[in-house]
Amino acid sequence: MKKINFILAGLILVLLFSACVSTEQKAEVEKPLPDVDILGDYKLPGEFHVYIAFGQSNMQGPGAIRPQDREGVSERFRTINVVAGRYANGHREKHKMYRAAPPIIIPDQNLVNYLGLNIGLTPVDYFGRTLIANIPEDITIGVVAVANGDMAIAAFHKTKAEDYYRFRGTLSGRPSQTEMQGMSRYKGAGYANMYEAIVQNTRLAQRAGGIVKGIIVHQGESGAGLADFDWDELMEEIYNDMLSDLGLEPNSIPILFGQTWNGGAGNTGGALANNERIQRVLPNAWIISSVGCGGRTGQGQPDSIHFGSEGLQLLGTRYGEKMLELVYR
C-alpha cells in the first residue's frame, strides 16, 4: 500500500510540474507587447509590415462590434493611432501603436450613430486578423487607418483637398457637412488634411523599421467630388503621390479597392467594376468583391450602402486573402 501511495504521490507531483510549465509557456506566448512610441528608438522584434487603409464610412466602421470581435486579437496586429482619444476602453495617444482591438478609427464616445445603432467595426479588423493567421510569427502587422463617412475621393488628395474644402470646382452639395466635420477632426489633431495624416503616420512607422507593403481602400459611394476630374484620375494621383512621399518606387505596392454595395462600382465611372478596368489606370490595383457581404440591420436598415458586421468581416477577410496572395505567396 505504501508503494502505491508513493507512486500516486509521484504522479501528482509530475502533473503539477507539467501544469506549471504549461502555464509559464502560455504566459510567455501571451505576453503583451508594449504600447510603442514610434517617435522613439524602440524596434519591434522581427519584421514590421505596414499597411495603409483609407476611405469613407464603410472603411471608418459602420458595423456593430460583437463580443467575438474583441476576442483573440493578436499582439502582432497593431494600429498606429492617428487621432488621440479613448478607444477600446483605453486612451490611445497620437503617433503610438496599440494592439488593434476595435474600434480602430471611431473613438468610444462616438460608437452610437445618428440612427441609434452601435457601430465601430471596419474591414481593417479582419484584414489584419487574416494576415496574422497566415504569415510567419516573426512578422508584426501595423495599420495606418484614416476614414470618415461621406468623403469624396478628392478629400484624400494631397493638393486638391484644399480646393475641395473651399468649395472650388466641387460637384453640387460637396463637400457635405459630414465631410466638413470629418476634416475638422483630423485638422484638430494637427494635420493639414487627411492625406497628411496618412503620410505622416506612415513615415513614422517607417522610422520604426516598418516596411510599407500595401494599401486598402473603400470609397466610391460619394464619387470624385470635383466636377472637372474623374474618380480614377484622382485615385491615380493619390496613389502616386503617396508612394513618392514615402520613398517607394512607382507601382511597387498593391492597392486593393473594395466594391460598393452588392458588387457595385458606386459613383466611380465604372472604375470598381473589375480588375481590367482599374488596371488601365493603376497596374498594381485589384478589385475586392462585395457580393454576399450583407448589410447592417435595425432602424430601417439595410440602407443599400452600409455593410453590417458579418459583411465587413467577409469583406475584410477578402482584402486579407488577396494581400496574402500578392505579398506573401
Image (spheres, grey):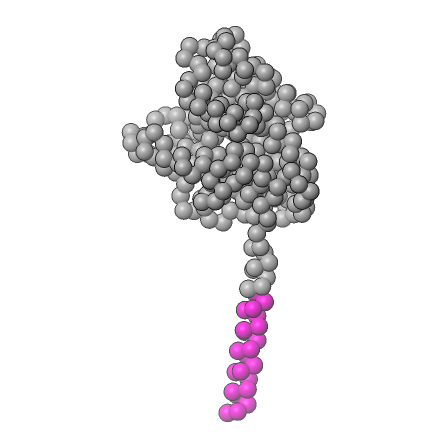
> Is residue 288 left or right of 241 when viewed as pictured?
left
- Magenta-colored span: 1-22
Q: Main secondary structure of the magenta part?
A: helix
Residue closest to the eye, 125 or 293:
125
Q: Place residue 255 in its image quadrant.
A: top right
At 59% across and 67% down in the image, what residue appears? 21
Does 50 sit above or below residue 161?
below
Residue 25, horizontal then vertical, whole percent: 59, 61
Q: Nearer the viewer, residue 110 or 67?
A: 110
Residue 75 point in image, percent of width and height: 56, 48
Quadrant for the C terminus, please.
top right
The verdict on residue 94 being magenta is: no
Task: Judge left or right: residue 293 versus residue 282.
Answer: left
Q: Residue, x 55% and y 90% (percent of image)? A: 3
Residue occupying image coordinates x 29% and y 31%: 299
**Residue 231 in view here:** no
Vertical placement of 280 versus 107: above or below? above
Front residue (pair 68, 172): 172
**Circle count:** 0
Is 18 colored magenta in this rendering?
yes
- Residue 94 seen: yes
Q: Position of residue 204 (x, y in %)?
A: 64, 34
